[in-house]
Amino acid sequence: MIRSLFAALVISTAALAPAAAQNASPPPGGGLGHIQSTNIFEVKPDANQLPGYTEQTNAERAKVQPGNNAPFWRQVNSGEPGYSSLPKSQAPEAGILIQRFVQYPGSDYTTAGEAWRQVRNHWIIPYGGGLLLIALVAILLFYFGKGSIKLHDKPTGRRIERFTYFERAAHWVNAAAFVILALSGIVMAFGKFFLLPIMGSALFGWMTWVLKTVHNFVGPVFAVSLVVVLITFFKDNIPRRYDLLWLKKGGGLLTGDHVPSHRFNAGEKIMFWGGMLFLGLISVFSGLFLDMVVPGLSYTRGNMQIAHMIHGVAVLLMTCMIMGHIYLGTIGMQGAFKAMKTGYVDETWAREHHEYWYDDIKDGKIPAQRTPDKNAKTSPTRPAGA
């Protein structure tokens, strides 16, 4: 009996407990355990309204806004050097993690590294590659449309020395160095578009590393040989009044007309002054800067990025000009390659392509043979008509 009454009491208490809990009033202030709900948009004052908010250190900011590291990253992005144990002579930018904001031609206003990347990837690579293809296609169209420039008259068999051994040696060293630099540069800049899918990343990576190393060592060779070439051929590339007529008629390349010139025509002089002197020296100085071989200069990231952009533009323009020069010096003009190979040209070739130079040779102003002939018992004679 007692057990039955006790069990009924327990069951009744358990059944009435949920109803009592639902009818009970909430604790003062609401919430659970005296924790009040809060609307974060109604908290006053905001942290950014505190005096000296923008001048807070990272430690001070953490007290009012835990996890807010804006002062730290603002200092990192400022470009101002922080502390570094490395000497500035060895690592001038060791204390700078992120470069300053800049805007290069063709880039957004962003960090210098990103701006350089945008100029390289959005301008130099696509437009430079397109320019090289345009130059190549133009040369092919000209060759298949006009063919090689041939002599109008028959060769006489009498030779004139056009280039001495020293001149040819200087030219070939400079030409060989340029070809190596151009091919290695083209592979490093554009190879990922046409070689990487074929070779795979492992072989292509190894090849570009080898080409980069060769590029860095051949660059100084090109620089020295370029100076020698500029000094050697400087006198004969001084512009003259008759060069204007050559330019006006385009050298007769399209019409086939005979346009007189001296030892070097106006087109070759443009190549000398614009391609070799102007663009060549810019390419050399920027390349040597990238090699970091010139003492006393500041090799910071920003300076290296600027030098790289200048180097890329200069070498692309120079390569397009030299492509035309190589074409005319090989298959584009009969006898031109032989002149640089052996040093001699036929009288007919000299008269038809460089008439003023040939006239000075006939008049005895310029010797027909500048290199002493060891096999000849007498001094070389001048060409017929002298």
Image (cartoon, rainbow, N blue to C red):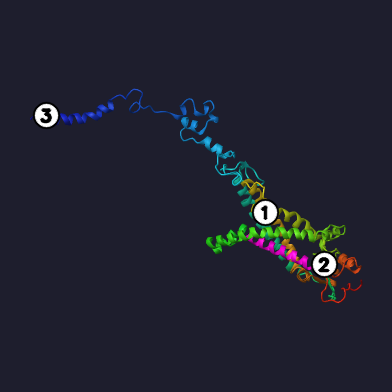
Q: Position of residue 70 (x, y in %)?
A: 52, 36
**The N terminus sits in image quarter:** top left
Q: Position of residue 246 (x, y in %)?
A: 84, 61
Under tag 2, what secondary structure? loop
Q: Tell me whether circle 3 and circle 1 mark residues in contact (CB < 8 Å).
A: no
Under tag 3, what secondary structure? helix
In this picture, residue 156 sits left or right of residue 207: right
Magenta span includes 166 = yes
Which residue in the structure is indicated by mark 3?
5
Residue 233 higher or lower than 371, as above or below: above
Q: Which comes sooner in the sequence, label 2 or label 3? A: 3
| Residues drawn in magenta | 161-186
For the residue pair 218 and 199, the one nearer the viewer reads as 218
Q: Amino acid at mark 2?
A: Gly
Q: Is residue 364 visible?
A: yes
Residue 31 higher or lower than 122, as above or below: above
Which residue in the structure is indicated by mark 1?
288
